[in-house]
Amino acid sequence: MKVETIRAWMIAAGEVKARSGEQRHSTSSLSEALADADPAVLAASRRHMAMLKAALSRIRDAWVAAQESLLTVTGQTRLLEKHPALEDSIRLRLPYIEPLNLLQVELIKRHRAGEHAPQVREGIQLSINAIATALRNSG
């Protein structure tokens, strides 16, 4: 691992202060992003888009590696352990957002396959707006 990477993790964990010009990264932001990401939605995408299989596998591996690194650096046993309210918010919203993600994957697959009916395009736009609204309203 590069010294810069280790230093960035140490800054994010609050172990050391950032020097002038160094970026500060929030481990809680990374923790939230990883908790929001759902490998199950990734699996559904994989079934519909065989051409992206290798890329999706690398994304999942990177997600797992990032999660493991974050937990090691922060000393947590699970994502958002130090932010229980946000953890609960994400846990409670996932059952509602996951079906929207899966619907969106199906509609995009149809659109890419040449199905350009107005209902498909509208469904894609509505699913994007619904997911964005759900994320915005639930933290």
Image: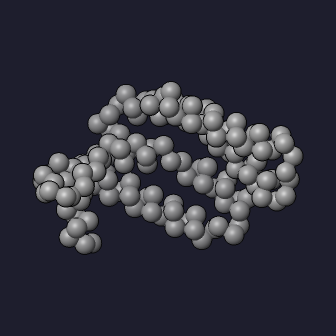
At a point 56% along the width and 31% down the height, the residue shown is 134
Residues 23 and 138: in front is 23
At a point 70% along the width and 36% down the height, the residue shown is 126
Residues 16 and 79: in front is 16
At a point 32% along the width and 34% down the height, the residue shown is 83
Position of the N terminus, as image quadrant, is bottom left
Residues 106 and 75: in front is 106
Find the residue positioned furthest to the front.
21
User: Would residue 24 be visible to someone looking at this image?
Assistant: yes
User: Would residue 10 be visible to someone looking at this image?
Assistant: no
Examine the rendered structure and indicate whether residue 76 appears above or below residue 6. Answer: above
User: Looking at the picture, how far across and down is residue 139, in whole percent?
Assistant: 44, 31
Q: Is residue 47 left or right of residue 62?
A: right
User: Looking at the picture, how far across and down is residue 59, in whole percent?
Assistant: 51, 62
User: Looking at the picture, how far across and down is residue 67, in whole percent?
Assistant: 38, 54
- Res 86 → quadrant: top left
At a point 70% along the width and 40% down the height, the residue shown is 125
Q: How many marks?
A: 0
**Colouring chosen for the image of the structure:** one colour
Q: Is residue 107 left or right of residue 97?
A: right
Examine the rendered structure and indicate whether residue 86 appears above or below residue 7. Answer: above
User: Looking at the picture, how far across and down is residue 111, in whole percent?
Assistant: 79, 53
Q: Is residue 80 left or right of residue 117?
A: left
Examine the rendered structure and indicate whether residue 73 appears above or below residue 136. Answer: below
